[in-house]
Amino acid sequence: ASLAIGIHPNNLSTLALWLDATDSSTITQTANVVSQWSDKSGGNYHATQSTADRQPTVESNSIDGKTTILFDGSDSLGASTRLGLGANPALTVFVVCNIFTDNNTDDRIFHIGGSSNSLSVGAGSQGWSWRYDGGNELYGSVSHGNDYLLAYTRPSAGNFASAKMFINGTEQTRASGGNDTGSPTSTDANFKIGSNYNGGGNFINGYIGEII
């Protein structure tokens, strides 16, 4: 079963990605430095990093005593794929994480697409957020050092304001938004964990245990 959703993710009919740090067989590492986090969804959308100073590390006994991947504020993983998704899909992202500090106003946990009108979920000093690189939806502030189960969800063909966010099962009140009537249009074949679209900024500093 999954720490994030309490059932086996392979029971989900539309599973596009499953990264599970508790499964050591999915992590390619040397001395705990990670070069690949393999996808368990069956789609083979493995997240990789070949640049040594951008590689995260394996951390045991972290979230709920389980193994996670530590992104230290300069790390990212990713692949040249959209996970089979269109520009404006129905999308739900589950994340098990613990954020240590804010690196920026906008720190990306998961990003799909290019540099404009894309789809991202994250944290940062402006709070938990959906980010679109052309709009945003902001929720409450991030309390650092706490273990979280996050769920970010949006409908197919929705605008930016149609997104929702849940923390530990509770829907969060939207604090503000930008360009609410806009919608994602990027079709770039790209996803990132822990950073923006090109792996060069908006880094998170914290543990990620699972992404579905």
Image (cartoon, rainbow, N blue to C red):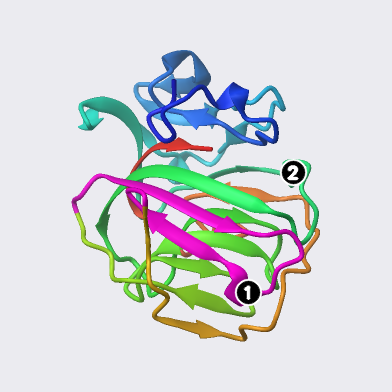
The answer to whether residue 24 is above or below residue 116 is above
Crowding at mark 2 (Cα within 10 Å: few <14, some 14-19, many 20+): some
Residue 23 sits inside the magenta stretch: no
Image mark for residue 81: 2
Q: Closest to the observer: 151 or 45? A: 151
- Outermost top residue: 25
Residue ID at (35%, 71%) = 127
Report if residue 40 is visible in the image: no
Give the magenta part as a residue range: 145-169
Q: Secondary structure at mark 2?
A: loop
| Quadrant the N terminus occupies | top left
Q: Which residue type carries mark 1?
A: Phe
x and y, in percent, of residue 159 in the image: 68, 74
Residue under label 1: 160
Name the residue type under label 2: Thr
In the image, residue 158 lies in the stretch drawn in magenta: yes
Note whether 138 is above or below 54 in the view shown: below
